[in-house]
Image (cartoon, rainbow, N blue to C red):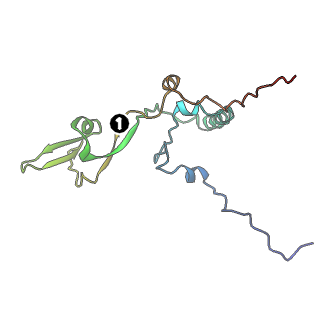
Amino acid sequence: MYTSDPIPRPAGPPVSSTPLRDALVPGRPGVQDAYVVLPRSLIETMPLPWQHAMVQILAEFHQAWAHLSWPEYRVVPSRRERLVNLDEDQLAEIGYLVEIDADGEVVYRERGGNPIPNPEETEVLVSCLDPIPTDRDNANQDTPPRGFPAPPIQQQTNWT
């Protein structure tokens, strides 16, 4: 028997068909346009149930995509800086140079020689020290223990 009542809609927003694309937006820690970086020292300190779940997800991921020709990746901690705030070594590292032209003006150029029209507005990625602690750093710092915290120890009292 059918009722004339409409089918109720589930509460909340509709479920996305692209949940990772929705969650992995540039600007979140470790997320760039084409890649997601998870610092090993942090994921290895996640609670054990999370690590087991991550191992399972990564195993399925690698099984699905193992047939591709994977390069080796070099991840360099970087920060955004305006081109005009960099010294010559930093400019050379990222493939830019600065020179003074015949009129005495400072000119910033790309590796190919093309001038940069607005160097004051141009932001680039320049390498920096990694602010994420490594396992070695964790061993030398006062950091929280790995995994879930141990339950508090209750003291027993002997009443006589």
Q: Nearer the viewer, residue 127 or 20?
A: 127
Badge 1 local density, few (<14 within 10 Å), some, or many (20+)?
some
Looking at the image, the residue that sits furthest to the left is 102
Q: Nearer the viewer, residue 135 or 72?
A: 135
The image position of residue 117, as x and y in percent, is 22, 54
Q: Nearer the viewer, residue 133 or 88?
A: 133
The image position of residue 84, as x and y in percent, is 24, 47
The image position of residue 50, as x and y in percent, is 66, 36
Q: Quadrant of the N terminus?
A: bottom right
* Residue drawn at point x = 49 percent, y = 22 percent: 140
The image position of residue 72, as x and y in percent, is 46, 30
Q: Nearer the viewer, residue 124 or 68?
A: 124
Amino acid carrying label 1: it is: Ser
* Residue drawn at point x = 55 percent, y = 33 percent: 42
* Residue drawn at point x = 56 percent, y = 51 percent: 23
Q: Quadrant of residue 9?
A: bottom right
Looking at the image, the residue that sits furthest to the right is 1
Residue that badge 1 annotates: 127
* Residue drawn at point x = 6 percent, y = 51 percent: 103
Question: Helix or strand or loop: what does disc 1 sit on?
Answer: strand
Looking at the image, the residue that sits furthest to the bottom is 4
Labels in figure, total:
1
- The relative height of residue 150 versus residue 79 in the rendered view (above or below) is above
Q: Quadrant of the C terminus?
A: top right
Query: Could you tell whether 158 is left or right of 140 in the image?
Result: right
Query: Could you tell whether 159 is left or right of 42 in the image?
Result: right
